[in-house]
Amino acid sequence: MTDTNIITTNTSTNMKAVFITHNQALTEAIDTILARHTIRGYTKWKDVQGRGTYSGDPHLGTHTWPAMNSAIIAVMGEEKVQPLLESLKKLDLKAEQQGLRAFVWNIEGVL
């Protein structure tokens, strides 16, 4: 017998995805924050290009703009989101010109 509904909704806890983009110089600090908050389910992308909304230099990996970003998407229970965002905000305030952003999305289902 095959289950035709392979995507399940998570009824035990509300799941969230936090998408983090950051200057590669912050990678070790971001890794430490994720570990401290016991966030294990994530995927990373290296060499991501981007530009801040309001200020800061572009991170394009070119001769003119040599810096590069990385990105992480982490899926977690809703209860972990606010503490994670608070830690990320503290890091951002220490190095505002480096570039760090986090976006939170609802997870509707899990395979």
Image: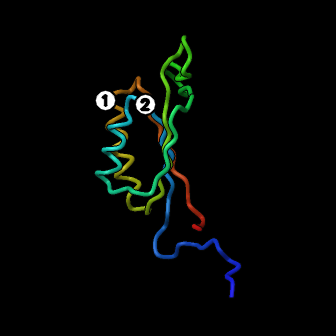
Label 1: how many Cα within 10 Å (few below 14, some 14–19, many 20+): few
Q: Residue furthest front?
A: 1
Q: Residues within 10 Å of mark 2 (few under 14, many from 20)?
A: many
Comparing 60 with 93, the one in front is: 60
Type of colouring: rainbow
Name the outermost residue toward the left.
36
| Residue indicated by mark 1 | 94
Name the disc covering residue 24, or none.
2
Q: Do the CB atoms of the residues marked 1 and 2 lie less than 8 Å apart?
A: no
For the point 38% across and 58% down, the residue is: 80
- Above or below residue 100? Residue 10 is below
Q: Tell me the CA gap for discs 1 and 2.
A: 15 Å
Q: Residue furthest top?
A: 64
Q: Residue at x 32, y 54 (%)?
A: 37
Report the quarter where the C terminus lies.
bottom right
Is 106 located above or below residue 69 in the figure? below
Q: Residue at x 46, y 71 (%)?
A: 13
- Residue type, numbered disc 2: Gln
Q: Earlier in the sequence, mark 1 or mark 2?
A: 2
Front of the two marks 1 and 2: 2
- Mark 2 falls on what kind of element? helix
Estimate the x, y position of residue 18 in percent, counting from the top left: 48, 50
Across and down, in percent, residue 42 comes to 46, 52
Query: As rendered, which of 94 and 44 lies closer to the eye?
Result: 44
What kind of residue is marked 1? Lys
Q: Position of residue 41 (x, y in %)?
A: 44, 57
Classify the position of the N terminus by image quarter: bottom right
Q: Quadrant of residue 27?
A: top left
Q: Secondary structure at mark 1?
A: helix
Front in this rendered view, residue 12 or 2? 2
